[in-house]
Image (tube, rainbow, N blue to C red):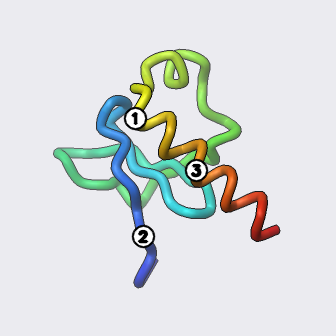
């Protein structure tokens, strides 16, 4: 994890990295012991995400796919 950049997604109490791994927030900090791939997130989670956070995730998806 050293040097990994995490982007906060406050509307869903999580952070996401450039590899599209989602880490839950625990006491306001990323819980690095647990993550899920973005593609495995439940519809309830997707339904709660704010427009700003959704835009950030969309940008990360775009750059992730472009770099593959």
Residue plotted at (23% across, 54% down): 29
C-alpha separation, residue under disc 1 versus residue under disc 3: 11 Å
Q: Quadrant of the C terminus?
A: bottom right
Q: Which residue is mark 3?
A: 59
| Element type at mark 1 | helix
Residue 36 on image: x %, y %? 58, 46
Residue plotted at (42% across, 59% down): 33
Q: Quadrant of the N terminus?
A: bottom left
Residue 19 on image: x %, y %? 62, 62
Point out the frontmost of discs 3 and 2. 3
Q: Please determine whether, in this image, residue 2 is positioned above or below residue 50.
A: below
Residue plotted at (33% across, 30% down): 11
Q: Which residue is mark 2?
A: 5
C-alpha separation, residue under disc 1 versus residue under disc 2: 18 Å
Q: Please determine whether, in this image, residue 13 is positioned above or below residue 17.
A: above
- Look at the numbered discs 1 and 2 and tell me whether their residues touch, using CB distance below 8 Å: no
First in sequence: mark 3 vs mark 2: 2
| Element type at mark 2 | loop
Q: Which mark is residue 52?
A: 1
First in sequence: mark 1 vs mark 3: 1
Residue 58 on image: x %, y %? 60, 43
Q: State the residue lying farthest toward the left.
A: 27
């Amino acid at each position: 994890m050293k040097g990994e950049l995490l982007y906060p997604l406050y509307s869903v109490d999580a952070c996401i990295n450039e590899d599209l791994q989602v880490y839950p927030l625990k006491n306001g900090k990323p819980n690095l012991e647990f993550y899920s791939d973005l593609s495995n997130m439940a519809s309830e989670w997707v339904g709660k995400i704010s427009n700003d956070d959704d835009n950030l995730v969309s940008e990360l998806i775009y750059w992730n796919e472009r770099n593959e």
